[in-house]
Image (spheres, rainbow, N blue to C red):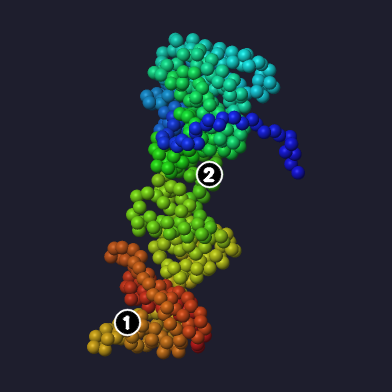
Amino acid sequence: MMNYKRYKKNPVVYYPERQWPNNEINKAPIWCSVDLRDGNQALIEPMVVEEKIEFFKLLVKLGFKEIEVGFPSASQIEFDFLRHLVERRLIPDDVTVQVLVQCREHLIKRTFEALEGVPKAIVHIYNSTSVLQRDVVFKMSKEEIKQIAINGTKLVKEYAKDFDGEIILEYSPESFTGTELDYALEVCNAVIDTWGPTPEKKMIINLPATVEMNTPNVYADQIEWMNKNLKNRESVILSIHPHNDRGTGIAAAELALLAGAERVEGTLFGNGERTGNVDILTIAYNMFSQGIDPELELSDINEIIEVYERVTKMKVHERHPYAGKLVFTAFSGSHQDAINKGMHALIERNNPHWEVPYLPIDPSDIGRKYEPIVRINSQSGKGGVAFIMETYFGFKLPKGMHKEFADIIQAISEKQGEVAPEQIMEEFKKNYIEKKEPLHFRKCKFDDHTEEGCTHAVVHYTDNGIEKSFEATGNGPIDAVQNGLQKELNINVKILDYSEHALSGGSGAHAAAYIHMLDLNTGKATYGVGVSSNITRASIRAIFSALNRLGVRDDNK
């Protein structure tokens, strides 16, 4: 038994007047990527300068207008990276870089040295305010902790006076989620009073879930309460920085946006300390799936993955929302069938809105392809195999044939695991199209007898390699061939169904024909498939395919 009594519940907020549950997300927040600082410090092998520059360029390309580039007072690499950005003129005019620094004078001084030449920057100061950190880490009183924040703000204000550019202050009461709300408000208001923001020159109050300590609704309550009680609110941009310790960082961020947050700090794919930061890509794609412009250029997820994995040496999980290799893939038969039908309905109804079961967005909208949507293993069903045959190879199998062919593929998947589309096609050829023994159709000639109202057929074929032929009549080519074969081979079969369709356009177009045939002697039924540039010839090949699959020649030798 797990010793759950070692742990106690974190306090929740008594806030019955909450309004966020009635709100909706209608627009994108201000996005700030912290990949190059928070994300980088969480890497086993931190990025070198050139890797950080490549990542920075990717973030700019994606449309981030605020990018935290590092902690320049913490190490020479961090300092040098910012200097490279400045000296190589890599910071676009519409992008604001952000730097993190503790509330200490020598660190703030070093930070401003790194910022020299930057026309506009966010200086992000912080100090921990939580009950636990005050008690066991800093061993300071509330007043002493508040004074650290005030002193840090004064220092930034002093250095900003002589800085040849615009400085925006950002303050974070670190470990906000473990801080008493009234005390967090007290500290933030003290910083606001000290800095003196205006509606024209706002500052940022950032409320981080440095450690995610409770359910997302509690974080939303905390954010709404602060949103309603912060001093000089019209001069403040309310920002959030959720982590993912409980695995609900995205939900917490979305609820915080409902609660009044205007800005989100996070990383691509949620990289960050411990369980990571909030995943900006997932939040943005979530908005996109609701018809909201995320105001980021995220149409090529594959490029983002490639750069991210290469420079961070981290892998995107196969089940990662939107980006994972398997997130647009269905192995389950019922899922495959629903996707297949949904795709057809979308085309047939000419629906302007994307509505396909199990697929919240069109994979092609973010640079993914349709091919991997349906993959076949032992859990797959008839719908998935049919989807592969049509999507990849253009064969629209009759509905009655779905299970027959799927059973063949399932037997293979139970032995080897996943079956690739190419192998499925090979099995289709082997079991249907190239099923040419013992009866192999060679050629035929048809004449219509208008006066008699029938078709005369002359068919040449081989039987176990022996060349043979027959003549027969019927009310059409298929009926004539069936009549001739029954007499020639002394068999008793019935064609239950017939269908055909074109396989490709142009002068080299081929047709596929499907024959559903019943052996009246044994009660066994199966499908045959024929392919030819001539639809009649394709139909005759399908008849011979079905006869070979029924084994009628073997039974009637």
Q: Residue at x 49, y 40 (%)?
A: 282
Q: Who is closer to the viewer here, 377 or 178?
A: 178
Tell me how far mark 1 sits from mark 2, CA to CA. 56 Å
Q: Residue at x 37, y 24 (%)?
A: 93
Q: Amino acid at mark 1?
A: Gly
Which mark identifies residue 193?
A: none
Q: Which part of the image, by quadrant, shows the N terminus?
A: top right
Q: x, y (%) of residue 61?
A: 40, 34
Q: x, y (%) of residue 474?
A: 33, 85
Q: Who is closer to the viewer here, 121 or 61?
A: 121
Q: x, y (%) of residue 228?
A: 50, 24
Report the residue that reaches farthest toward the front: 16
Mark 1 falls on what kind of element? loop
- Residue placed under numbered mark 2 in the picture: 320
- Residue placed under numbered mark 1 in the picture: 476
Q: Residue at x 54, y 22 (%)?
A: 172
Q: x, y (%) of residue 323?
A: 49, 44
Q: Amino acid at mark 2?
A: His
